[in-house]
Image (cartoon, rainbow, N blue to C red):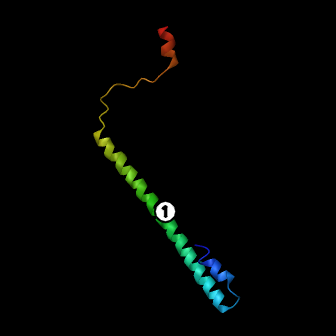
Amino acid sequence: FYDKTIKTGLEMEPGVGSVIITVVAQFMFLMFTFGVLLVMDVLECFLHALRLHWVEFQNKFFYADGIDFKPFTYGAILEDD
């Protein structure tokens, strides 16, 4: 993308036309870069909200009425021997 925008204006012979093309090309390059960053930021916000909705939705079906968790310990194995 850099080759098609900014580099084109920089490789032209010096003059008013090359300055105008360089300024327009830089503006296009900056707007494209800004657009990519904006899309990434919006995607980040969307995915975070989606994750929160998923976590809150799953809590409606969790009752915690199963078997108590007993973590693995070496002490319990050694006491059995």
Residue sitting nearer the eye, 1 or 26: 1
Residue sitting nearer the eye, 23 or 18: 18
User: x and y percent of residue 79 in the render?
Assistant: 49, 10
| Residue plotted at (48% across, 62% down) | 41
Residue at the far right in the pictured view: 14
Q: Secondary structure at mark 1?
A: helix
Residue at the far bottom in the pictured view: 16
| Residue plotted at (51% across, 12% down) | 78
Amino acid bearing label 1? Met
User: x and y percent of residue 70 in the render?
Assistant: 42, 23
Counting other residues with Cα less than 10 Å from the Cα at mark 1, is it few (<14), some (14-19), or many (20 or more)?
Answer: few
| Residue plotted at (42% across, 55% down) | 47
**How many numbered callouts?**
1
Residue sitting nearer the eye, 27 or 18: 18
User: x and y percent of residue 23 in the render?
Assistant: 61, 83
| Residue plotted at (37% across, 46% down) | 55
In the rendered view, tell whether residue 28 sits above or below residue 58. Answer: below
Instruction: Give the position of the N terminus as an image quadrant.
Output: bottom right
Q: In the figure, residue 8 lies in which quadrant?
A: bottom right
In the rendered view, tell whether residue 64 sits above or below residue 27. Answer: above
User: x and y percent of residue 75 in the render?
Assistant: 51, 16
In the rendered view, tell whether residue 20 sits above or below residue 81. Answer: below
The residue under label 1 is: 40
